[in-house]
Amino acid sequence: MDDKKVSKKLNRIAVTLLFIALSTGNIRALDALNNDPPSSEADQMLNIRINVTNEKELKKAAETAGSGTFKTLTIYVQPKTYRVRDTIRIKKSNVRIVFEPGVKFLLGDHANNPVIGIGDWGNPPAKIISNIYISGNGLEVDGNKANQDSEYCTDFPWIRNNGIDVRGVHRLTIEDVIVHDARSGGLVVSWDSSDIRIVNSSFSSNFFDGVAYYDSERIYTTNCTMMSNGYAAMSLDNNLKDCIFSGCIADSNGDVGIFMRYSEQVRFNHCVIKNSGNYAAFLSHDESNNGVHDIMFSGCQILNNQNGGIYVASTAALSDYTSVIGCVFRGNSGDAVKSDGSVIWEAANIVQ
């Protein structure tokens, strides 16, 4: 059969299908005219937007972020004090939450849960999620520690009741949040999390630490304050790598400004550490002799700490390459810089 006959035959088939569709109302007959393959399931997933104005809508939005089907999810939370008992869970990737100014999350009495949980809660986490963005605009997270019964989550006893708990998350940004009075820590990041930015936020009056970073890498904390926490402003441990604190303030914490073990390539740039109940910074090794390596303090102010400034409580065999450059030490009760044998490199510091 030549090309002209084939073309005429196809045209007759198309006209016939069009006639059937128009005469019967069966639009599906037109599908035979469409040469494009059916859309994949991923292409059919929606870019969902949810607006939250009350607790019921907040719970529904959290359920969607936990188990819904979407390509991207954006949640807008309107100004209000939301009284929450269950953790606001984000268990899937590609979630963005935008809080309007004036939003407060208040954990209910005896709830014994984290307020916000990002990532999988398996022990250990069963998967990694990614691409999470929290735009706080002054979001206040109140852990209501005075009215909780335990630091442990009731249904998940390996989870601590933190203000914000992050486990197994890659590419997370948290901006402009105020976290206080958590029964455990303010912000805790752990379990192979990476590429995280914490910006312009406050973590204060928490039972244990302001922020705690464990078993993670590339966490960049900028222009944050950690004040009046029960233990440390910053607790860093368990194979933490390649993290930077810039322009942060640690003030009036119960024990130390910085507690650090088993960490490497951590930088403190232009930070203020003052009025600690013990040392400004205590660096050491864990029970398996994993110490600290390549730690740098640059342009920091170390002021009025009870037992002294920076103390590396390790030998040279366990911890090395701590550098203190261009820092000001003033009003500390003990030594500005102290070591149990680990070499500390110092340059251009002012001690008063």
Image: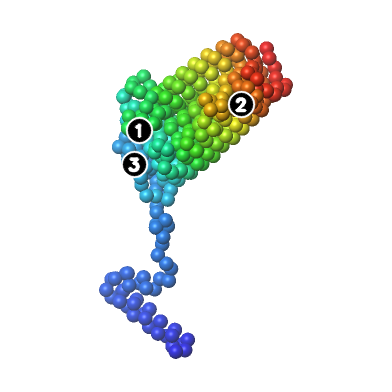
Calculate the distance from the C-alpha at mark 3 to the C-alpha at mark 2: 46 Å
The residue to which callout 3 is attached is 63
Percent x, y for residue 212?
A: 49, 28
**Which sits earlier in the primary sequence, circle 3 or circle 2?**
3
Q: Name the residue located 36 percent from the left edge and 70 percent from the top edge.
A: 31
Residue wearing tag 2: 318
- Name the kind of residue labelled 3 in the image: Glu
Toward the right, the furthest residue is 348
Taking the spot 47% from the left edge, 89% from the top edge, the residue there is 2
Q: Nearer the viewer, residue 270 or 216?
A: 216
Q: Is residue 304 visible in this depiction of the protein?
A: no
Say the numbered circle drawn on residue 180. none
> Crowding at label 3, few (<14), some or many (≥20) Cα neighbours within 10 Å?
some
Q: Secondary structure at mark 1?
A: loop
Displayed quadrant of residue 26: bottom left
Q: Are marks 3 and 1 in contact (CB under 8 Å)?
A: no
- Is 65 located above or below residue 1 in the figure? above
Q: Position of residue 318 (x, y in %)?
A: 61, 26
Q: Find numbered disc 3 in the image and state the secondary structure of the residue it sits on.
A: helix
What residue is shown at x 40% (from left), y 28% (from top)? Answer: 160
Closer to us: mark 3 or mark 1?
A: 1
Residue 261 as seen in the image, left or right of residue 52: right
- The residue tagged 1 is 156
Name above or below for residue 150 compared with residue 98. above
Cα distance, mark 3 to mark 1?
Answer: 18 Å
Residue found at x 60% / y 24%: 271
- Nearest to viewer (mark 3 / mark 2): 2
Tag nearer the camera, 2 or 1 = 2
The crowding category of the residue bearing disc 1, from other C-alpha atoms within 10 Å (few below 14, some 14 to 19, many at least 20), is few
Q: Quadrant of the C terminus?
A: top right
| Label 2: which secondary element | loop
